[in-house]
Image (cartoon, rainbow, N blue to C red):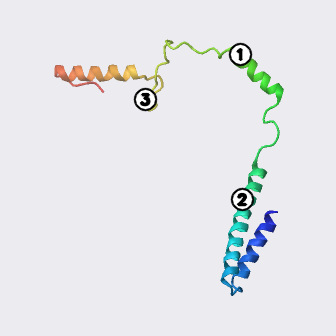
Amino acid sequence: MRWILLLASLTCAGLFFTIDSPGLLALDMLGIFVFGIGAVFAFAAARIDDQSRSGDLISVSELAEIRRRAAAGPAPQAPRNAPAAPVRLTDEPDGASIEGAIDGLRRRAAARRDGATPEA
């Protein structure tokens, strides 16, 4: 059907340049418009129909399994107040931590305050 509508619209467009009567030109323009819009909608409907999903998206057994897991409740999670693992610096030697770097900075600042030369 969509090809017939497209062919009718193109036929009306071809006849448009051969008609001399103003009344027939108006009728021809109406045919171009109506058949053209019909063809556009027919092609759009065919594309939507081709890309639409057909049938069930999920089987009944899979749906029952999902419902069973949802009724069982959420999976257990780690407590929120659990201590975090120490953060390791990537550019420091193995075993260096943020705490060690902060202690070193504090020692350097104290040495500067006391007037001594800080150790490297």
Q: Is residue 116 above or below residue 34?
A: above
Closer to us: 101 or 118: 101
Dividing the picture into quadrants, the one containing residue 64 is: top right
Q: Which mark is residue 41?
A: 2
- Secondary structure under the numbered disc 3 in the rendered image: loop
Q: Is residue 75 left or right of residue 107?
A: right
Residue lying at the far front of the rendered structure: 23
Q: Which residue is mark 1?
A: 71
Give coordinates of residue 38: x percent, y percent. Answer: 73, 63
- Secondary structure under the numbered disc 1 in the rendered image: helix
Q: Is residue 60 left or right of residue 100?
A: right
Tell me the residue at 25%/24% (across/down). Answer: 118
Mark 1 crowdedness (10 Å alpha carbons): few <14, some 14-19, many ≥20: few
Tell me the residue at 67%/15% (across/down). Answer: 73
**Which label lies toward us, 3 or 2?**
2
Q: Which residue is mark 3?
A: 92
First in sequence: mark 1 or mark 3?
1
Badge 1 amino acid:
Ala
Mark 3 crowdedness (10 Å alpha carbons): few <14, some 14-19, many ≥20: few
Closer to us: 99 or 52: 52
